[in-house]
Amino acid sequence: MIPLSIPNFEGNEKKYVEDAVEQGWVSTGGAYITQLENMMAGYLRAESVAACQSGTAALHLSLVDAGVGAEDMVIVPTLTFIAAVNPVKYQQAEPIFMDCDETLCIDPKKLRKFCEEECDDIDGRLIYKGNGKQIKAVVVVHVFGNLADMEQIMEIAEDHHLIVIEDATEALGTHYIGGRFEGKYAGTIGHYGAFSFNGNKIITTGGGGAAIARTGEMTEHIKYLSTQAKDDPHLYIHNEVGYNYRMTNLQAALGVAQLEELPEFIRRKQRNYALYQELFSDMPLVKILPFREGTDSNQWFYALDLSMEKICGSLYDVMNEMEKRGVQTRAIWGLVHEQKPYKNAIAYQIEKAVYYSGRILNIPCSTQITEQEIREVASVLTDVLGEMSYE
Ligand SMILES: *Cc1c(COP(=O)(O)O)cnc(C)c1O
């Protein structure tokens, strides 16, 4: 079986984890945590980084620090992993679901139209006409490592007083190479950025994540919240409600080794994507989605747009057929606004997300995948689609 995406531990992982165990520093204190934070801050050219238990925790703490609460609304994409949205609910705020464009990321045109037509600007606050509540923030997901249109989004956010929380959980390393944000990395452009080191992300700590805020002071506050908001090292003084969201030293040991390999992982992801691109270039029924021009993407996941109207069966039938022939694939997420906890939420002109959710297939993209395996994936897909096509 050629797996979809598996972790790669070819570097110093074992050595550093063993070292952490030997030293006895396995929990939320220890040198690997600060080392990981400093390495990431250096790599992303950020002032500081707060290492967390998960990407979800990083997103949650960003919302907490941004002051999003029960009276507020937050704009979110519907075409995303649900973890990008749930933290809005943790804060008892209300999500407003937005469509994607052909990049699979949030559609800036619709975002602007929504702010202009469905909202009022009252004393520098964006108020949703439908219920009089303030829309405080927008969560922007860089889907599959592809940068959302941050130039447009930041302009809209500036015009309409929105806090921008970047879900960069899939986009560690992706950055602009030109334009207004030249040299800027995903997660460092908005007010907050969240990263994930879950098992299938570009680097992994088993489970883990990190948060970055626009100022070092804000990031320090997130760190404080992640460690039970402890104000005094000895006396157990707590001036806020905190969380147990801090990364452990064991996770960070793994993370430091993974970060050392990140440039090599990205290089392989890009090389493999280029080969897939070549193999699919003249293949009917398949289009491999590009990454945004003017950016250098980590190319974490590859998305195929299948011409389902010409295929007899669903995306799941294609997946099952591939699986039978030894290739693991994955369908894109079910839309979040259609999930049970969000059935009654506001969804604004969702069209493209519906279209893409029935036709995007992810294919094997591990950093260890061989050239031969990539050719095998393409050949199996050719066979499967050939057999299932109406033509
Ligand atoms: C992985 C992921 C998350 C959550 O990260 P965890 O570390 O698993 O909590 C959030 N949003 C998106 C888009 C993701 O892919």
Image (cartoon, rainbow, N blue to C red):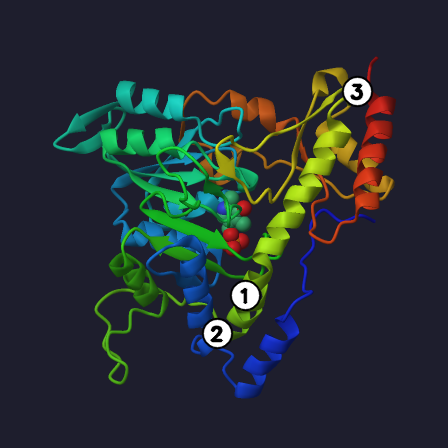
Q: Distance between the residues labelled 1 and 3?
A: 44 Å
At 42% across and 35% down in the image, what residue appears? 178
310 with respect to 62 (left or right): right
User: What is the x, y in percent for residue 202?
Assistant: 59, 52
> What amino acid is found at the position of numbered circle 1 in the picture?
Gly
Please give left or right for residue 103 compared with residue 315 in the image. left
**Label whose residue precedes the other's in the sequence (3 or 2):** 2
Nearest the camera: 267 or 219?
A: 267
Name the N-terminal-most of marks 1 and 3. Answer: 1
Name the amino acid, label 2: Tyr
Q: How crowded is mark 3: few (under 14 residues within 10 Å), some or many (20 or more)?
A: some
Tell me where residue 8 appears, x and y as whole percent: 68, 60
Q: Which residue is most to the top?
A: 391
Residue 32, numbered label: 2
Q: Residue 255 carries which label?
A: 1
Label pair 2/1, CB-CB below 8 angstroms: yes
> Which callout, 2 or 1, points at the residue further toward the start of the chain?
2
Question: What secondary structure is marked by label 3?
Answer: loop
- Would you place residue 81 above or below residue 37 in this image? above
Q: Can residue 200 be spotted in the picture? A: no
Quarter where residue 181 is shown: top left
Q: Distance between the residues labelled 3 and 2?
A: 52 Å
| C-alpha separation, residue under disc 2 versus residue under disc 1 | 8 Å
Q: Mark 3 points at which residue?
A: 312
Q: Which of marks 1 and 3 is in front?
A: 1
Relative depth, front residue between 303 and 182? 182
Q: In this view, does 223 lie above or below 189?
A: below
Nearer to us: label 3 or label 2: 2
